[in-house]
Image (cartoon, rainbow, N blue to C red):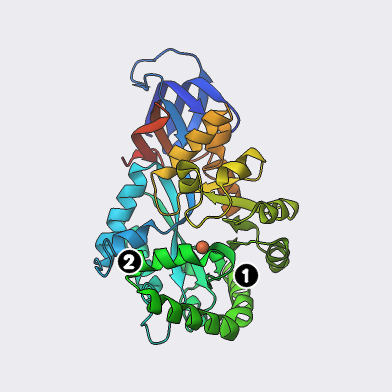
Amino acid sequence: MTETVFANAKIITEDTVLHGTMKIVDGVIAAIDSGAGVPPGAIDCEGDYIAPGLIELHTDNLERHLSPRPRVSWPKRAAVLGHDRELAGSGITTVFDALRVGSEADQKRKGYEKYARETADNILDLMRQRALKVSHYIHLRAELCTDTLVEELHEFSPNDRVGLVSLMDHTPGQRQFRDTEKLRVYLMGKHGYDDAGVEAHFTRLKELQSLYLDKHRAATVAYAKEVGAVLASHDDTTAEDVSASAFEGVTVAEFPTTSKAATACRAHGQYIVMGAPNIIRGGSHSGNVAAHDLANNGLLDILSSDYVPASLLNAAVTLGMLMEDMAAGIRKVTAVPADAAGFDDRGRIAPEKRADLVRFAVHEGLPMISSVWVGGARVA
Ligand SMILES: [Fe+2]
């Protein structure tokens, strides 16, 4: 039996912050008690916070490791390891790695090469070898208006830890990219398109949408049911988008782009996910609704680090301080995503839950992580 006691800690439980001690036995939380004392043999947390390990439902951070610079590709195995350690150091102890499925048959579209299956093989293989620090699941992001979506989806079976499937349509002029100017700037910066290149690209994408959208949406909804994955919408913009998603069985709404859509998500009982970078930057990089405004109106349930892992704890602490309720801020990155993804063994500091934990202090509004544990074992 291994036993660890954390003492003199501000323990963030589901609904309060309790100054006291916590006992971990064999990787599981055994007891929580209030009181400032430090028993012999206990780890003195010096008044730092201890929160549950963070649960991240949608990160494409791995893409940055797979392609650390435009047109530079990195070996997949090395990329997965780098990404995993970055997550551990950011306090993320459970992650759904967002992998896009759906490419173009000719593989010419920049940034849309096929990569999901091979990348997942590396993640799953490294997990089997116990080489990864945090708990990884697969989030298949179905890019609906693409040639190869259906065949790429079916390369994944129920044994591939596919926990989430999201329905994406990034055709310009709607949803995330109602403002096509922002998309133009993004494409020029990320993929080196010129103006004529962007125009030709937009025309082609609209053709793909008319070919595939309806057919591929239905196929993806059916696939998610088949593998038992939680279904998520992505960038829903109108109340009609949301009722269509709800009808298809969507329970998680990623990044609704307007308050109208978020209000409709609430009415349909969907979990509303917003980007943590949006909180940190004070707005959306695509010019859509600000996460702060949704939070103020009670329309933000879950934060996702999206493309910056360190933003997750940072944004949760920022919201916790704004609401003067640290437990409420931290819930959005722990207990609520646990519920949305169907976990009952993690996401809360309570007896019998996994000892996935983050110790941090807050200096000038910024969380400073000092240590992270997964199942009671220190990982960062
Ligand atoms: Fe999007």
User: Does the rendering let one see residue 103?
Assistant: no
Q: Amino acid at mark 1?
A: Lys
- For the N terminus, give its image quadrant: top left
Mark 1 CB near ligand 1 (8 Å cut): no
What residue lies at 48% left-to-right and 77% top-to-bottom? 202
Q: Secondary structure at mark 2?
A: helix
Q: In the image, is residue 329 above or below residue 113?
A: above
Which residue is depicted at the point 45% across and 42% down? 280
Q: Secondary structure at mark 1?
A: helix
Q: Are circles 1 and 2 on residues that touch, CB within 8 Å?
A: no
Decide: is 363 above or below 285.
Answer: above
User: Residue 53, relative to residue 102: is it above or below?
Assistant: above
Residue 90 drawn at (x, y percent): 37, 43
Q: Amino acid at mark 2?
A: Asn
Residue hosting label 1:
225
Q: Where does residue 6 sit, x and y in percent of width and height? A: 40, 25
Q: Earlier in the sequence, mark 1 or mark 2?
A: 2
| Residue 169 vs residue 301, the one in the foreground | 169
Q: Tell me the number on the disc at residue 75.
A: none
- Return the mark for residue 122: 2
* Residue 337 seen: yes
